[in-house]
Image (spheres, helix red, strand yellow):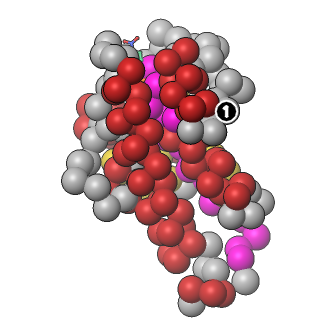
Amino acid sequence: MLQDKKTSVLFVCLGNICRSPTAHGVFEQMVIEQGLNQHIRIDSAGTGDWHLGKQPDSRTIKAGQQRGYDLRHLRARQVTAVDFDRFDYILAMDGQNLSNLQLLQPGHFTGTLSLFLPYGQGAFDEVPDPYSGGAEGFEQVLDMVEQAAQGLLQHLREDVLNDASSS
Ligand code: 4NP
């Protein structure tokens, strides 16, 4: 039996226009393809406020499109302390963003605040910021995010969603 309550996941980077919208779109598509969108709620946000209301960076949109992800509907927003009341998992793209989230974290938060990449089997813990680099950086973000997203979904299936097939 799947639980009635949705499990919620918030992906966080700095600007919310490159890494976290990529994770948002990739994970959302995976969740839909596996028929779990009634059980998992997904969002993304940035610790910075420079790009509020904007679409993902055009390079993020283009790289995603080339792998079949449509990220055009996403809009940047800034993470706030209220997000700790609204999400079970708050997953940071790098250590700097994790540190900033730890400063914002209220004492009563009982969810998971951690780095995102360790959910995958890759060699790295952080998704490098691609904003000031070339197109290959956006490809690397997708490679890392796709791998970690698989691991995260497996984790949610086994430990949270209480799927009968895995218990
Ligand atoms: P993101 O990339 O954190 O992956 O969205 C960045 C986007 C914008 C800036 C920095 C990083 N910026 O400084 O404007």
Look at the numbered disc 1 and give the secondary structure of its residue. loop
In the rendered view, would you say 45 is above or below 52? below
Of residues 103 and 70, which is closer to you in this image?
70
Q: Quadrant of ligand 1?
A: top left
Residue 13 appears in the picture as rendered:
no
For this orientation, the residue located farthest to the bottom is 167
Q: Residue at x 34, y 27 (%)?
A: 137
Quadrant into which the N terminus falls: bottom right
Provide the residue span drawn in magenta: 2-22
Q: Is residue 1 left or right of residue 114?
A: right
Q: Residue furthest top?
A: 50
Q: Position of residue 51 (x, y in %)?
A: 52, 11
Please tell me whether residue 17 belongs to the stretch shown in magenta: yes
For the point 51% across and 41% down, the residue is: 23
The picture quadrant where one finds residue 24 is: top right
Residue at the left extreme of this rendering: 123
The amino acid on which the numbered mark 1 sits, given as a three-letter code, is Asp
> Looking at the image, which is closer to me, 160 or 35?
35
Foreground: 96 or 127? Answer: 127
Residue bearing the label numbered 1: 70
* In the depicted structure, whether residue 127 falls above or below residue 123: above
x then y, percent, for residue 27? 57, 49
Q: Quadrant of the C terminus?
A: bottom right
